[in-house]
Image (tube, rainbow, N blue to C red):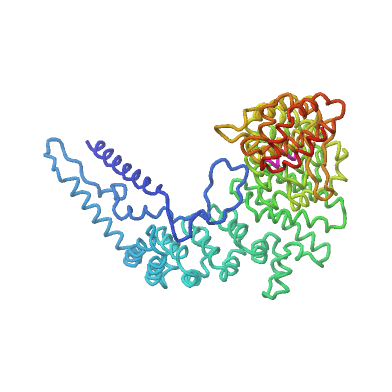
Amino acid sequence: MVSSSKSGQKRKFEDKGKQAASKSKKPHLESNGATKSTEKKRSRPVTAVLDTESSHSDSDGDASELEDDEDEWSDVEMEDGDTEPAPTTGQVKNPNAAKESHKAQKALYEQRKAAKPYSDLLVEAKRVWSLARAKNIPTAERQKHVKDLMSVIRGKVKDIVFKHDASRIVQTIVKYGGQKERDEVASELKGKFRELAQNKYSKFLVTKLIRFCPTYRQSMLLEFQPQVLRLLLHREATSVLADAFELYANAYERSILLREFYGKEATLFTMTTGSNEEKEKAKKGLAGILDGVDVERKRRVLSSLKENLTTIFNNPDKGAITHAIVHRALWEYLNALSGLPEEAEQEKLRREMFETCQDVLAEMVHTKDGSRVVREFLAYGTAKDRKQILKVLKPHIERMCLDDEAQNVLFTALDVTDDTKLLSKSLVSEIVDAAPRLYTTVQGRRSLLYLVIPRSRRHFTPAQIASLSETDSTRAKTSKKDNSSRESEVRKAASEGLVDWIKANGEVLVRDPGASLVVGEVMLYAEGWEPKSDAISTLLEAISKPYPFDADPHPMDLAHTSRLYKTLLQGGHFNRKTESIDTAEVGNWNTAKFAVRFVDTVGKEVVTAVCTKGERNGTFVVAELCEALVRGGDEVKEARRTLKAWFDKGVRKIIESGEARGKSVLLEKLSAL
């Protein structure tokens, strides 16, 4: 009887918990502008499969649960001996017993709660807080409630902030309040930030204060400085430091967090008084500290930095390995090795560091400095080292292709690895197989295009090309294979898979603006002409539908699609500097043969219709078709005669009387047939 009563109460408690959970899952609509979507987010490791806890998320976003805490209670909250005694056998059951028992339990709960410190203050604060965090209220009204809330807890913030419910109340003030209220909270908490950062609930408040209180940010970070390494390995505090470094701190404030990595000697002798000159030197990081010091001191500082980094790498389960602050310290270490006098010593220290972190390199590639670190190891590494790096990265290649920084690591691997057979199996095939999922994003398209036209200014920014070029000087020393030969072998390894992908999906790809860019480059620059025959058939069949098309727009009415076929017919891209076409190699693409296939496959009805009916968006494409056949000479004279016969005087008259763009260019090209 007792067990059944307890199980019934337990089920009731679980049902209430489910109801509370369902309430907390409702979307949070906020007109104030301080929404989660507007906050900056840290770069995400490519090794992360599921959404990890976001340290800068709002812990007060689940604050609706607190209302339930006032009303929801159960036997779980009662101490031993407080539960209602089970009725004995034969005793008449009181129908109101459960209700009276719950009433008694609630009274006991309220009594215990009232005995806690600041209970009256928290009751009043929660009342005002419920008004301040209400959804869809005017900004002016919210500001009034926030000021009232601040007046309730003023002077007591430091005493109540470690309680999980009170922490959410303070977060609401920081989130919705003005700068005056935010600075007041930061001022009251001065000296407690390190302790707050290690608390499960108040760590969110610290992140908000670092974000919203720039005048107090430096003093907050100075509180962290003596124990930065310990905090990075702390379960709660690690995300606070990571957010502060990557999202909110300026160059000088980052140097404060990095200083402990350099060891006690560097910390003692680089404490600044805050002058502009010293701040400028501090912004340089490790390079500023080592500037002008003797070799022995350099060695001591580098030894301390290496020891501290090793501590981080020996604790991979703590999560600090993925943080940008660790990657910056590691990059500074590798950069500083060039300041040592002996090359053998540089190589020895670089190798020791590589052996320390080689198994966790995939955890670093998502940040700018982490990407540079892995690329440095690739450039300086032996063939065995590069094989080991590719082995570590292989499970994450698709995710890396979609990340701005991580993809640079893949590009560098393609640039420096001499063993192209290894590249083909470990890297190229993985990228090609992922093509159906990559072409939809800019980053994914870059990853596909780098296989056939690496560092092309049409698809890669000058900054990205400059960044990739940083390893070129090192590659000249460590790689034996000629760069053009390596590029050709990589292109050849990728060509078959990419062409087959176009063959199978060409009709869909030509209609997509981004995919059409990839299709054009693959068809022009992939190895060989003959292997592309089936893919060409797919592309030409895609535009062979009657024109104009009644349902979806005809491919020729899509600007990016007509531009694709125009580019293929002219054999390359127009160069504005030289005012000429940068044509692909004849062995890879033949415009005359493609023009013949165009005439044979698309047919008279469509070719003439795109110039005389509907929107007439095919005039420039047909003009290039004429030009390609003229360039082909006697080898394509039959196709040239056929096309000329299609555009007799009647058709030309219709073109001339129409208002299609490029009609004068088309008529000129037709007259040259």
One can see residue 377 in this view:
yes
In the image, what residue occupies the spot 50% across and 54% down? 36
In the image, what residue occupies the spot 19% across and 45% down? 98
Q: Which corner quadrant of the image does residue 119 belong to?
A: bottom left
Instruction: Verify whether residue 163 appears in magenta.
Output: no
Rendered view: 63 above or below 530: below
Quarter of the picture holding the N terminus: top left
Q: Nearer the viewer, residue 122 or 490?
A: 490
Q: Which residues, given as a range, are shown in magenta?
A: 445-451
Rendered view: 434 above or below 99: above
Instruction: Verify whether residue 450 appears in magenta.
Output: yes
Q: Position of residue 617 (x, y in %)?
A: 66, 39
Q: Position of residue 358 (x, y in %)?
A: 71, 43
Q: Main secondary structure of the magenta part?
A: helix
Q: Position of residue 364 (x, y in %)?
A: 67, 47
- In this rendering, position of residue 589 left or right of residue 555: right
In the image, what residue occupies the spot 30% across and 39% down? 11
- In this rendering, position of residue 183 left or right of residue 553: left
- In this rendering, position of residue 157 left or right of residue 436: left
Quarter of the picture holding the C terminus: top right
Q: Nearer the viewer, residue 658 or 540?
A: 658
Q: Nearer the viewer, residue 302 or 480?
A: 480
One can see residue 427 in this view:
no
